[in-house]
Image (cartoon, grey):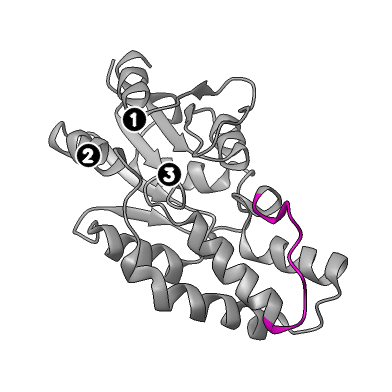
Amino acid sequence: MTPKAVYWDMDGTLIDSEPLHDEALVTAMRSVGIAPPPDLHERVLGIAAWPVYEMMRDEFGLTLPYDDWIRRKYSHYLQHAPRLQQRPGALEIFRDLQRMGVVQAIVSNSDRLIVEANMRAIGIVEPGIKSITRNDVQEGKPHPEPYLRAAWLTGIDPADTVVMEDSATGSRAGLAAGMRTIFWPERPATGPDGAHVASTAEDVRQLLGML
């Protein structure tokens, strides 16, 4: 049964942006003399900017104020964002759901300027598409607030929605909001209990028809 609404995570789910996020973070770290650890990607995947800053401060001795730090990271990201591409198969699913009349929204742990840059890169800045960013809520993922805000904005019962996520952090947020959640990681990974795991875009299509 097709859901009434599908709420999409952005980074890594709709757009192949995680490598650029990693690149921007590494560039910012090296600019202040911090060597990135080998497991950096796994440690920051799906995490909002402020908790990452706290990790840099508490574990790596970062002394820059937050505004100076994030300016370094975002300057690099925004410079290169126009070259970003959709995650293979994701935008086709998004457009098919549009044609079917399914309500959709973007729900991201990134700040608004990053989300809007990503939306421009893949061509989904258009009337009627709602987006919820880290700037719009008090609590970011894995807290359910971002997805519950999407349900409130679209006027759809959480039980009638599906969440699309590539990270365990985001998947936990969708599940905590009482929404059916598809965990579609870019790399093989174990999702949280209760999430439906997809390996390919075709898996996603099948799950959307079943949930």
- Left or right of 189, for residue 157: left
Q: Nearer the viewer, residue 173 or 79?
A: 79
Q: Is residue 147 above or below residue 48?
A: above
Q: Earlier in the sequence, mark 2 or mark 3?
A: 3
Quadrant location, the N terminus: top left
What's the magenta bit mostly, secondary-structure-wise? Answer: loop
Magenta-tinted stretch: 31-41
Question: How would you rate the neighbour count of disc 1 (Cα within 10 Å): few for under 14, some for 14-19, many for 20 or more?
Answer: some
| Mark 2 Cα-neighbour bin, 10 Å: few <14, some 14–19, many ≥20 | some
Amino acid under disc 2: Glu
Q: Kindly report the distance in space between the C-alpha atoms of the residues bearing marks 2 and 1.
A: 9 Å
Identified by mark 1, the residue type is Ala
Identify the disc placed on residue 80: none
Q: Quadrant of the C terminus?
A: top left
Please say whether residue 136 is visible from this viewpoint. no
Q: Residue at x 48, y 59 (%)?
A: 133
Label 3 environment density (alpha carbons within 10 Å; few <14, some 14–19, many ≥20): many
Answer above or below: position of 52 versus 210: below
x, y percentage for residue 43?
71, 51
Residue 36 position within the rendered picture, expressed as x and y whole percent measured from the top left: 73, 65
Residue 33 falls within the magenta-colored stretch: yes
- Report which residue position mark 1 lands on: 201
Residue 139 image position (x, y, % from top left): 63, 54
Residue, disc 2? 92
- Image location of residue 97, percent across then percent down: 22, 34
Report the Cα–Cα distance between label 3 and label 1: 11 Å
